[in-house]
Image: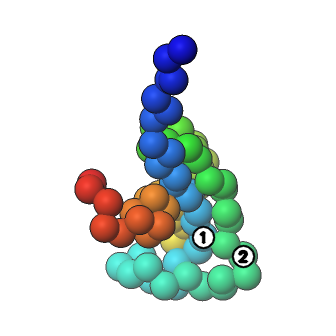
Amino acid sequence: MTDAVQPKQLLHLVFGGELEDVSGVKFSDLSKLDIVGVFPDYESARAAWKAKAQATVDDAHMRYFVVHLHRLLEPDAPK
């Protein structure tokens, strides 16, 4: 029997909200953050980020971000 090697899970968080100032990353109201979700790979996280960013393109104060959760969970792992 051959054991299939599972690829490492690389979790990514996509979230966003309204910024106080477009030159920074301080949110106006943390209780109104839009948590889009946690995704198993960068490609799916980027697709979700892109959809949200495009949907809010007319509001300059709205920003969405992709956070590499796997880097926070295992900071010493090779990148």
CA gap, disc 1 and disc 2: 7 Å
Residue 56 rendering spot, x and y as whole percentages: 58, 55
Mark 2: which secondary structure? Answer: helix
Q: Which quadrant of the figure has residue 33?
A: bottom right
Identify the residue under disc 1: 17
- Farthest-out residue, right: 31
| Residue at the (66%, 54%) spot, across then down | 37
> Disc 1 marks which amino acid?
Gly
Q: Earlier in the sequence, mark 1 or mark 2?
A: 1
Q: Residue 27 versus residue 58: which sits nearer the camera?
A: 27
CB atoms of marks 1 and 2 within 8 Å: yes
Observer able to see residue 53: no
> Disc 2 marks which amino acid?
Lys
Residue 27 rendering spot, x and y as whole percentages: 55, 82
Mark 1: which secondary structure? Answer: strand
| Residue at the (58%, 65%) spot, across then down | 16
- Farthest-out residue, top: 1
Against 47, residue 35 (above or below) is below
| Residue at the (41%, 65%) spot, across then down | 74
| Residue at the (35%, 79%) spot, across then down | 23
Q: Which mark is residue 50?
A: none
Residue 15 rendering spot, x and y as whole percentages: 59, 63
Q: Residue 22 versus residue 79: which sits nearer the camera?
A: 79
Please state, as top left, top right, bottom left or bottom right, where the N terminus lies in the image: top right
Against 70, residue 1 (above or below) is above
Please state, as top left, top right, bottom left or bottom right, where the C terminus lies in the image: bottom left
* Left or right: 18 as drawn, with respect to 8: right
Q: Which mark is residue 32?
A: 2
- Farthest-out residue, left: 78
Count neighbours of disc 2 (C-alpha within 10 A) and say few if under 14, some if 14 to 19, many if 20 or more: few
